[in-house]
Structures are given as C-alpha cells and as structure tokens.
Image: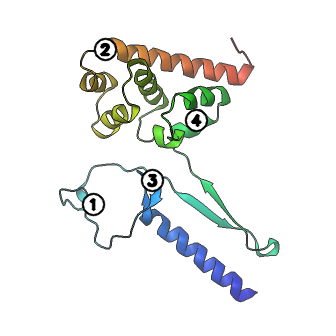
Amino acid sequence: MNFTRTILGAAAATCLAGAPALANPQHGHAAAPQPHATGPKSGTPPAASHKTTTTTTTATTTAPARSGATQTSAHVMNPIAAKISAKPQLNARITAMLPPHMSLNRASSGFKNQGQFIAALHVSKNLGIPFRDLKNDMTRKHMSLGQSIQDLKKSAASDTEARRGEVEAHDDLRSGASRDHDGDHR
C-alpha cells in the first residue's frame, strides 16, 4: 500500500513537472517534446524573443491516502474568460457570439481586456469578418480594432465600426454586471 502511494505520488509529480513543457497553447493538445527548441522561426533563442505566451495548464491533484488515490483535473481559465464566466447573464450573451467550436477561454486569450475582446466579437458579427482574423490582427500583429477592420474589410468605415463595437461591448459589460447583481432583466 505504501509503495503504491509512493508510485502514484512520483507519477503525479512527473506529470506536473512535464505539463508546462508539453503544453501547446494554440491548440490545447500536448506537443512532442523538443530537446533543442529555438524560439521563433527566425532561429532567435527563446531568451531574445519579446513575444509573451499565455499557456493554459491543467492541474492534477491527489487526494489524501485515507480516501484512496483519486485524481481530479481543473482547467485554469485566462483572466478575461474567468471574469466573463463569473457573470451568468454576460457569459450567456458572449458565449452565443463565439465562433462554432471555440471556447470562451480560447477566444479571449491574448486580448488586453474584456472590452477589447467583446468589441472584436461584435465587429465580427456586425461586419461578417471572421473572428479568428480579427483576433490574429489584434493579438499577434498588435493592431487596434480600427486598424484590423481596415486591414480585413477595406470598404468599411473602420473608425465608425470600431466605435460601434466598443459601445456595444460597454453596454454588454454594464448591463451584464447590473443584471447579475440586482436581477434587473430590462
């Protein structure tokens, strides 16, 4: 019995130690280990890269020995997804706008704040621009919402549409917060 606990403890520690190295934040799957990974495709070493990477990890815990060796997994959400998920009305509204097969956590990762993320969702719906393209421009190319609109839909009035998306996001955040706290359902 003591040997079994020792083996389970060592296995759990090994899994926890190796999880961040194998995490693939872009697709949520484990990547093959790379003994001599270099940074970006240019060959720059990882220390010289200025790119910030957000990794979603899965924590594994082992219950006390008295209750048996039970393991549970908890998915860690990024701060934006966590804030939205904490407000049921807002969560329902935002989740309904997400592209098919994209989680709230994945969709919101990389954005600076809730407002920027929600405004991008609204612009995507309003103008028929794929959300993935807007997200890529804003989180990887560091474009503003207006710049991304101009890049992806040249015929649109980018400043006007960006402001429209920001106002809609502000309204969502304001009404989502008041509905969840005082029960006002307009």
Alpha carbon separation for disc pair 4 and 3: 18 Å
Which residue is more in the foreground, 114 or 168? 168
Alpha carbon separation for disc pair 4 and 1: 31 Å
Label 2: few (<14), some or many (≥20) within 10 Å? some
Label 3: few (<14), some or many (≥20) within 10 Å? some
Disc 4 to disc 2: CB gap under 8 Å: no
Mark 2 = which residue?
159
Choose mark 4 or mark 2, whichever is in front: 2
Mark 3 = which residue?
55
Mark 1 = which residue?
46
Disc 1 to disc 2: CB gap under 8 Å: no
Disc 3 to disc 1: CB gap under 8 Å: no
Q: Amino acid at mark 4?
A: Lys
Q: Amino acid at mark 2?
A: Asp
Residue 6 located left or right of residue 23: right
Instruction: Indicate which disc, 4 or 2, sits on the residue closer to the N terminus.
Output: 4
Residue 167 located left or right of residue 63: left
Image location of residue 18, percent across then percent down? 48, 70
Q: Secondary structure at mark 3?
A: loop
